[in-house]
């Protein structure tokens, strides 16, 4: 049974083991976004994602971006991925949606783009673009909201 809600995409490989230095840098990012450090587990689970069963966020090597892609989900920083998991999934647990539901993933990126402190403008844009991509991948097309246009285009 799948029980993790994750950013997914073509990021770095989830089987890559995070080093002590990488974990320390990720903890700095967790603190910067105002998240509760005790919710995060490093090098546990199959991939980076929120576990409904354990109510924790597992962080693996796929937290890091894949810069050869053009998809916003692949390009967003590790801080943005942590925000997606924390503000988008953990803060909404338990979700009324099934794991992997496009509405749950869209909401996670949309809310993280708006609510997360200390994200770059680029990461807010990537998160918002990802939110709308989640719907598009499910065959649902929305016009950008006023807030989305502001975060994506700056006006």
Image (cartoon, rainbow, N blue to C red):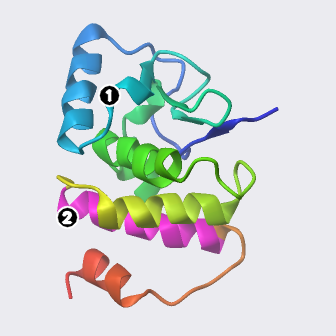
Instruction: Judge whether 97 appears above or below 48 on screen.
Output: below
Q: Is residue 1 left or right of residue 80?
A: right
Is 94 magenta? The answer is no
Mark 1 crowdedness (10 Å alpha carbons): few <14, some 14-19, many ≥20:
few
Q: Is residue 134 left or right of residue 31?
A: right
Quarter containing the N terminus: top right
Instruction: Judge whether 108 appears above or below 22 on screen.
Output: below
**Residue under label 1:** 37
**Relative depth, front residue between 117 and 26:** 117
| Mark count | 2
Q: Quadrant of residue 12?
A: top left
Q: Secondary structure at mark 1?
A: helix
Mark 2 crowdedness (10 Å alpha carbons): few <14, some 14-19, many ≥20:
some
**Residue under label 2:** 121
Q: Is residue 131 left or right of residue 38?
A: right
Residue 107 in sight here: yes
**Residue 80 % position (x, y):** 33, 49
Residue drawn 27% across and 35% down? Answer: 30
Residue 68 in sight here: no
> Range of the magenta residues?
120-136
Q: Is residue 152 left or right of residue 105?
A: left
Q: Quadrant of residue 111?
A: bottom left
Distance in Å between CA atoms under marks 1 and 2? 24 Å
Q: Residue furthest right?
A: 1
């Amino acid at each position: 049974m799948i029980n993790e809600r994750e950013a997914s995409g073509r990021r770095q490989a989830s089987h890559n083991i995070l080093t002590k230095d990488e974990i320390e840098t990720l903890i700095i990012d967790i603190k910067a976004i105002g998240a509760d450090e005790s919710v995060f587990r490093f090098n546990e689970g199959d991939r980076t994602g929120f576990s409904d069963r354990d109510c924790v966020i597992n962080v693996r090597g796929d937290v890091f971006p894949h810069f050869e892609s053009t998809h916003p989900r692949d390009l967003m920083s590790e801080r943005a991925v942590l925000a997606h998991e924390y503000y988008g999934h953990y803060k909404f647990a338990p979700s009324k949606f099934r794991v992997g539901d496009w509405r749950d993933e869209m909401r996670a990126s949309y809310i993280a783009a708006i609510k997360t402190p200390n994200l770059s403008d680029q990461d807010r844009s990537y998160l918002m673009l990802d939110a709308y991509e989640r719907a598009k991948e499910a065959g649902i097309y929305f016009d950008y909201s006023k807030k989305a246009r502001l975060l994506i285009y700056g006006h």
